[in-house]
Amino acid sequence: MEGSHAARSEAVSFGRIVSFTDGVFAIAITLLVLNFEVPHVHDETERQLAHLLDELAGDFGAYCLSFAVLGRLWIVHHRLFSMLATFDGRLITLNLFYLAMIVLVPFTAELLGDYGAEPLPAALYAAVLAAASALNWLMARHAAHAGLLRPDCQEAVAPWASAGALYIPGVFAVSIPIAFLSPLAAELMWVLLVVGRAVGSRRGGRLD
């Protein structure tokens, strides 16, 4: 009876962790669109509206990139947590630090959209995503090595926890100094990373 009660309590606690994480992602993604300010056209001319919309191009680019990155991070997080048999305090702590980076993405995306030609916003954006990706890797690695995974999921999670998976945070980290030389070059690195991962996942039948 006590074992059954403990199992139910752990299931509730795990459900709260997942729900909280999903809520943070939902808020972060929603905040991305709040970076857009609806243009106010005074003389109601189509040319003026087109000009004002053109000025939002930087914000729109930051939105598309950030949505793609947050979506992919959520997918990997969702798949990882669906393979857990249990959890511990270290995983919860890593998850909280991970979410701390996720909620910074809308802020840094707004900076990037407004000041995309400046090095500092690009470097800050890259730093946040490098930290989020690294924490994602740490959660997978800890879950694999601490015996938190279901036995049938060890092989599936192994690639996420391997040293090779560090190339994702590595690309973002390398783009930080590059941003101070050329923000555009750093931004192209991120786009190529996101597009490359999407194409690779589709060809390999993976969602990570």
Image (cartoon, rainbow, N blue to C red):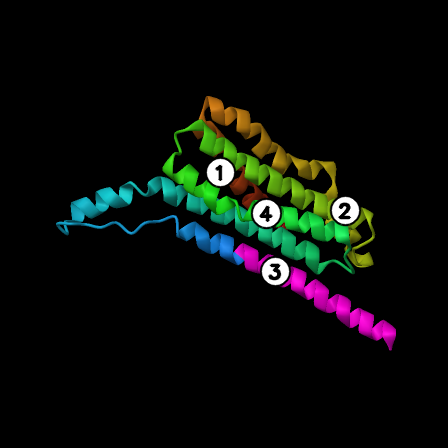
Q: Name the residue under label 3.
A: 20
Residue at image location 69% in from the left, 54% down from the top: 80
Whether tag 2 and tag 1 are in contact, CB under 8 A, the answer is no
Residue placed most toward the observer, 129 or 152:
129
Residue placed most toward the observer, 27 or 147:
27
Other-residue count near label 3 (Cα within 10 Å), few / some / many at <14 / 14–19 / ≥20: some
Say what secondary structure mark 3 lies in.
Answer: helix
Say what secondary structure mark 2 lies in.
Answer: helix
Residue at image location 66% in from the left, 43% down from the top: 135
Other-residue count near label 4 (Cα within 10 Å), few / some / many at <14 / 14–19 / ≥20: some
Is label 1 or label 4 in front?
4
Whole-angstrom CA distance, mark 3 to mark 1, is 29 Å
Say what secondary structure mark 1 lies in.
Answer: helix
Q: Name the residue under label 2.
A: 142
Magenta stretch in the rendered image: 1-25
Is label 3 or label 1 in front?
3
State whether the magenta stretch is mostly helix, strand or loop: helix
Depicted 198 relative to depicted 121: above or below: below
Whole-angstrom CA distance, mark 3 to mark 2, is 20 Å
Q: Name the residue under label 1.
A: 191
Other-residue count near label 2 (Cα within 10 Å), few / some / many at <14 / 14–19 / ≥20: some
Q: In which quarter of the image is residue 130?
A: top right
Whole-angstrom CA distance, mark 2 to mark 4, is 19 Å
Whole-angstrom CA distance, mark 2 to mark 1, is 29 Å
Say what secondary structure mark 4 lies in.
Answer: helix
Q: Mark 4 points at which residue?
A: 100
* Residue 139 image offset from top left, x and y in percent: 71, 47
Residue at image location 56% in from the left, 39% down from the top: 128
